[in-house]
Image: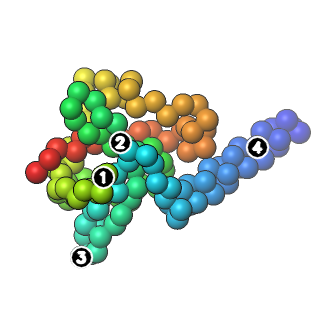
Amino acid sequence: MNVLWLVGYGLLGYVAFVATVEVLIRVVQPDMEGGITLLVKDGNGGEMQRKLAVLEHEGALYISSNHWLRSWHYAVLKNPDVEGIRHGERAAYTAVPLEGDERATVSKHYNMGFVLRFFCGFAPSRFLRLDPR
């Protein structure tokens, strides 16, 4: 029974660790070289800003929600017309959720690595393509 308690406390500790990391990332939002600041309408007349990593693949821009806290992602799905600031330039985009072969291809190229996935609690990645408007 002691082993089960240790495993239980270990899992509880890991969940608390991931929750803390998720909140810190949401609050701090570190800049990423080559990243994008996404501006999203939140449905209440306001605007959300998220700093995200960008994958450039075959001439297209891709972003991903790799965390459990992904309110910005749900807001984009409701209103896919977004703006982004990248390299000091502001541009309008339509965000398109990925499916099928395109999703599989981008998933192979968008490698977070084990450590970052561990810190994010192995949240499933949700990919979007940013098409210029």
Q: Earlier in the sequence, mark 4 or mark 3?
A: 4
**How far apart in space, not on screen, are marks 4 and 2 (Cα)?**
34 Å
| Residue 45: assigned label | 3
Which three-letter amino acid code belongs to the residue tagged 1?
Arg
| Residue 54: assigned label | 2
Of badges 4 and 1, nearer the viewer stands 1
Q: Earlier in the sequence, mark 4 or mark 1?
A: 4
| Residue 86: assigned label | 1
Crowding around mark 1 (Cα neighbors within 10 Å: few <14, some 14 to 19, many 20+) is some
- For the residue labelled by badge 2, is the local secondary structure a helix, a strand or a loop? loop
- For the residue labelled by badge 3, is the local secondary structure a helix, a strand or a loop? loop
- For the residue labelled by badge 4, is the local secondary structure a helix, a strand or a loop? helix
Q: Earlier in the sequence, mark 4 or mark 2?
A: 4
- For the residue labelled by badge 1, is the local secondary structure a helix, a strand or a loop? strand
Q: Residue at x 25, y 66 (%)?
A: 41
The residue labelled by disc 4 is 10
**How far apart in space, not on screen, are marks 2 and 1 (Cα)?**
10 Å
